[in-house]
Amino acid sequence: MKFKNRGDCVVLEEDVFKTRGDGSEFGDWVWWFWLFFLDDPSVVDKPRQMAVIWSIKDDSSIKCNGSVFNFDTQSEDAEGVVASWYFDGEKMHHDFLLEKSYMDIGPGSLGTEGEVPTKFCIDGNDCSVSIGKDFHFKAKVCQDYDFAINSTSSGEYPLGMNYSMLRSNRLGLKGEIKEEAVEGSAYFQRVDVNAPTPSWYWGIFHFENGGFLDYYKPHIFGKSLKEEIAFYDGNKTHEFSEVSVDIEEKGELPSFHISAEAESGNKKINFTVRPYSKASWKFEKKVARIIPTELIYREYPAKISQLKLVDKKKEWKITLDNLGSSVGNAEYTTGFLL
């Protein structure tokens, strides 16, 4: 298995709406995913969040959260599913949107027409997303620091399978929710994968001082496929390649204790992710109409409750006192989808 380094800066407008082509490769799955983090001075402990995903998978049928979606794989039309959840500061609106739709993909936009129409457009460094009549967001690519610039990564699996990802780690955000002006930050990714989908741990967090942290650990049958933490402290980027994730089950919401040590042994990081709500998608599919497979994809609006980065050689450390408050999302996925 080979994983390539992150690529150079890319132009969102030119690359986001490209796909592999005819979608004929087995298991080819492409999705466009947004997370919107809203600044809420009155609810600092549980900030509002919204997620939306447009998904196209080269399958004739798939079941998600009890609904069966059938697709004509021979059609030239791009059929898929658009889904969204919304945490309003108190309540999680699970399956806020979950419907099959034709995906109208153009040079600079993606849209669906259904019971809840959606639209995603890019114009230079400006992105706009609308979900129904009540949710409108404008996200702007932030170029204040290198780690926020749009980037790509890719990897190769056995048997010619592979994946590619384009992402923007942190964007400035303004918008309206039911005519209320809102602002905050956003995260975007476009993923194209031609491989079975394993379980994974993943998290994305934005800090008050402009910092950013993400971690990723996909695994199958207990064996890690990749391990990484990337942490931008507001001045410098710190990367780790050996990651430990421990889950503390407590009531309905788990906590995640994450740690890593640099190869040199001079630098260590540990932090705790504490969710305050939960949404999930359960995918079910039968291989050859006989063998059942499933993937449970859980998303947790969350905060970092403690963080410490220590550099033994330079004798300094970074904590939440340096970073300010956090907001983010943690994913905990179990199962295996072929």
Image (tube, rainbow, N blue to C red):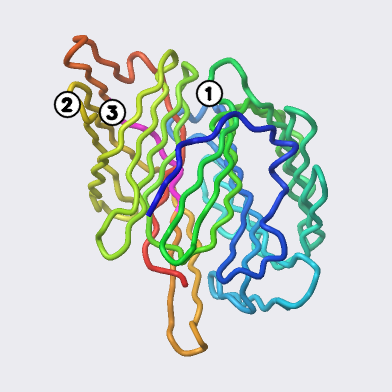
Q: Mark 2 sits on what residue?
A: 265
Q: Amino acid at mark 3?
A: Gln
Q: Amino acid at mark 1?
A: Pro
Span highlighted in magenta in the image? 299-307
Question: Whole-Å distance between the Cαs marked 1 and 2?
Answer: 39 Å
Mark 3 or mark 2: which is in front? 2
Residue 200 position, x and y percent, is: 38, 54
Residue 219 position, x and y percent, is: 33, 57
Q: Mark 1 sits on what residue?
A: 41
Query: Which of pointers 1 and 2 lies earlier in the amino acid sequence?
Result: 1
Whether label 1 touches label 3, CB < 8 Å:
no
Whether label 3 touches label 2, CB < 8 Å:
no
Query: Which of pointers 3 and 2 lies earlier in the amino acid sequence?
Result: 2
Question: In the picture provided, is 121 more to the left or to the right than 247?
Answer: right
Magenta: predominant secondary structure element?
Answer: strand
Q: Quadrant of residue 211?
A: top left
Image quarter where the N terminus lies is bottom left
Q: Residue at x 29, y 44 (%)?
A: 256
Q: Mark 3 sits on what residue?
A: 306
Query: Which of pointers 1 and 3 lies earlier in the amino acid sequence?
Result: 1
